[in-house]
Amino acid sequence: MKISIVEDEAVWREQIQSMIEKYGREQNISFQISAYEKGRDFMESEDADLLFLDIELAEGEDGFGIARQLMDSGNQCKVCFLTSHTEMARLGYRVNAFRYIDKRHLEEITEALDFFLAARIQDRIIYCNDTAGICVKINLNELLLVETYGRKLRYLMRDGREYFCDGRITETAQRLSPFGFFHIQRSYIVNLKYIEKANSHEIILCTGLEVAIGRVHSKEFKKEFFKWRMRFDQ
């Protein structure tokens, strides 16, 4: 997951990056973080899933203007504005701002990341090659589980559709982990969102499917499932 920071003052850039890194360590989520002093440097790449953007930048740059360029170009990056003047937040509706963070309360970054990740699993699309070499689109919001199937992976959707694709279970688990999926045993990755019941030995998904919890995964599963319920369950 790619996060960018555009802030002209080094002290703020460093504090914001430090808080994002701390969040990633605590939540066991890998972020690729890029920090920029100037908005034009970021705009040369426009490569971020979430952007922490100062409203008032040096050299005449304007955070609202940068967000407008992103929106007009069709870029799907979520913009979280940084400001010392909260009265400016009312202008954010013009550029579909995701969040506002008062620089005097940088602890709000944690909440912003929580809500971003919660929304992210609803929107996320991944692409995989099926057994015929055709690229298929998989909506993570509808993905129930992934399981090994011979030398392939079976992606089972909530409505019963299934896709057989290339890939390795461990690499796929790492890829899906930031979006609420857990590698619950050697052969299965499950969507935590669709777990109806769980005990120390197995889980029951919303479809009634029962999946055993691997012995070596049991302790970590309890921790991750609890965190999921606390952060994302509505």
Image: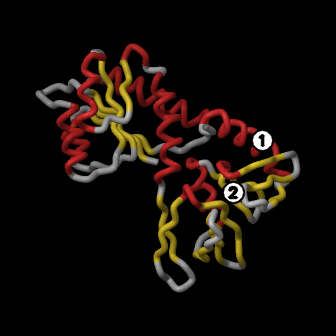
Q: Amino acid at mark 2?
A: Val
Q: Relative to 152, is 48 on the left or the right?
A: left
Image vertical order of residue 98 relative to residue 198, above or below: above
Q: Is residue 203 toward the left or the right of residue 98 in the image?
A: right
Residue 166 sits above or below residue 142 on the image: below
Secondary structure state at the residue bearing disc 1: helix
Mark toward the start of the polypeptide (2 vs 1): 2
Q: Residue shown at 28%/27% (left/top)?
A: 54
Quarter that holds the C terminus = top right
- Tell me the distance, in whole angstroms, between the alpha carbons under discs 2 and 1: 13 Å
Residue 163 image-quadrant placement: bottom right
Give coordinates of residue 156: x percent, y percent: 65, 68
- Give the percent coordinates (x, y) of residue 102: 37, 18
Which x, y percent locates residue 37?
Answer: 25, 32
Of all residues, the one furthest to the bottom in this rendering is 132
Give the residue number, with chain letter if any, for mark 2.
190
Which residue shows up at 65% across the image and 49% down it? Answer: 193
Lateral position of residue 105 relative to residue 69, left or right: right
Q: Residues within 10 Å of mark 1 (few under 14, many from 20)?
A: some
Identify the colour scheme used. Answer: secondary structure
Secondary structure category for the residue under label 2: strand
Near-viewer residue (191 or 106): 191
Which quarter of the figure has residue 80?
top left
The residue carrying mark 1 is 222
Say if 31 sits above or below 207 in the image: above
Along the viewing direction, whichever of 151 and 182 lies nearer the viewer: 182
Residue 61 coordinates in the image, percent (x, y): 15, 31
Q: Are marks 2 and 1 in contact (CB under 8 Å)?
A: no
Q: Residue at x 63, y 39 (%)?
A: 233
Horizontal placement of 165 versus 38: left or right? right
User: Image point 20% across, 41% down: which residue?
Assistant: 68
Q: Amino acid at mark 1?
A: Lys
